Image (spheres, grey):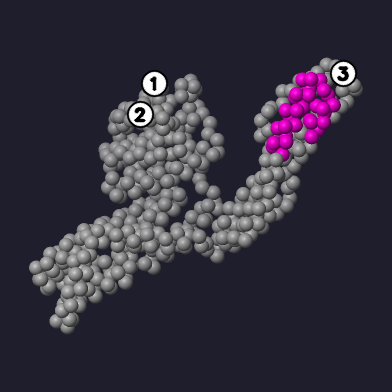
Amino acid sequence: MLNAFFIFQGETGTLLYDKVFFQEMDESMSDMFSGFLIALKTFISKMFFDGSKVLKSINLGDYHVVITHINEINSELVMVVDKEEDKSATKIIPKIVEIILNNKELFNESEGNSEQFKIFDEQVNNLIITSKNIVDETLLDQKSDVFKSIWGQRGRISANLREELLIEKEDLYNKLASTQNYIEKSVIFDEIIEVLNKLDATEELIRVQAQAKAVKDEIKDRRIRLKYFLKETKDALKYKNYKVAYSNFYSFSAKLRNLAQSHVQKKYADLANSIMNKDNISHSEFSKIISEILNIPDKIVDETLLDQKNDVLKSLGAQKGKISVKLQKELNIKKEDLYKKIGSTHNYIEKLVIFDQIIEVLNKLDATEELSQIQAYAKALKDEIEDRRIKLQYFLKETKEALKKKNYKIAYSNLFSFSSKLRNLAKSPVQKKYTDLANSIMNKDNISRVEFSQIIYEILLMPDNIDEYLN
């Protein structure tokens, strides 16, 4: 089945069009897709700047994502299909591409208009509706409700998250300005692009992507030249042409500047100078130097650059946990507010939700000791809720069994225990309702037969799913 498809502008990763085939989306599904779309925007823009135009595919849980580049509008068509039925659903790709190409002026902001968009939208809808086994047929019966936009449902990011992202962006720009190393710059640019995608800062994103591409191009160019200079150095040494060997190996070491770590670059610069100073070096020592250079593996360039990248990623990862003084202050205020909320409620479900929020804040604050304590409280609360859930299920089952046998004393005992276990778990009117029903069983002699039958019927029809009684 086809679950959704999107059209992204290749250069910016901007979402141009989307169709999502769900009548209703719960919060977890919506969160999953919105998070996926943010990651996808980054992936699309990276594809563009890396020069990749081939079809790509990604796995997303139970779904399979197929990405097709449409060169004529410089965009990507992204299909989200069921993993088990991806072949039948992806057969529709050429037809969708055909509709897009027939309306390609729509994707040029200076030419597209709302009337053309309506025509395009109708053509897509008709294609989906007339294609068999593409979307769930139950959805097709209600055309007006089927085609919903996750993007529209999710809305913008929260003010708190925006503030955190802006602080992170500023910190990354400071790191970028403080380094001359191209590998480090490239990694930081990737981090900035990810943040800008989340902030949906299109203009700034385009500018940063261009700068990132220039750095990547410089790294690519240097990689080619490094391999060339290393090869020429070895060839010259084999023919004992030390002047040419020095020239090439010195160029090799020079190209490592601002690319490899300084001690690596210095090592090869010293070896190059040793070739020029061969008359001041003993024959055996010079032979060792020549042998060392000739034994440098051809893949040393890629390995050196990879090592440098891994070091940068490790360093950034270690720093990522650190937060600014401003954010730390805000998180401490939020933590105190959450502690007040948890003290003001007796409901276990509410407490558990607040505990999860406190744990999230403490993780950001890296408050290990306090975090362990809160996690222990939260676990104890979860265990209590789970224990009550089991007992509620048992008391409900026993109540119904006793009523079927007209054993009203046992039915009362179990239903009263059921209502007691709902205290601090369900809302008070819910808990009171079942306490009253339990008391009605005990007072059956004071209730009319018809009314008592209705009470028994109501109890027997109580849902077996315990979650329906909880907050």
Q: Where is residue 358 in the image (x, y as percent from the top left)?
A: 62, 53
Residue visible at 20% across and 73% down in the picture = 289
The mark that comes first in sequence, 2 or 1, is: 2
Few, some or many C-alpha atoms within 10 Å of disc 2 (few <14, some 14-19, many ≥20)? few
Does the rendering let one see residue 214? Answer: no
Q: Give, as a three-letter code, the residue at label 3.
A: Ser
Q: In the rendered image of this protein, does residue 55 appear above or below residue 444?
A: below
Determine the residue located farthest toward the right in the rendered image.
446
Badges 1 and 3: C-beta atoms under 8 Å apart?
no
Residue visible at 69% across and 47% down in the picture = 381
The mark that comes first in sequence, 1 or 3, is: 1
Identify the magenta region. 388-417
Residue picked out by circle 2: 87
- Between residues 355 and 179, which one lies in front from this camera angle? 355
Q: Position of residue 368 (x, y in %)?
A: 59, 60
Find numbered disc 2 in the image and state the secondary structure of the residue it sits on.
Answer: helix
Q: In the rendered image of this protein, does residue 35 appear above or below residue 147?
A: below
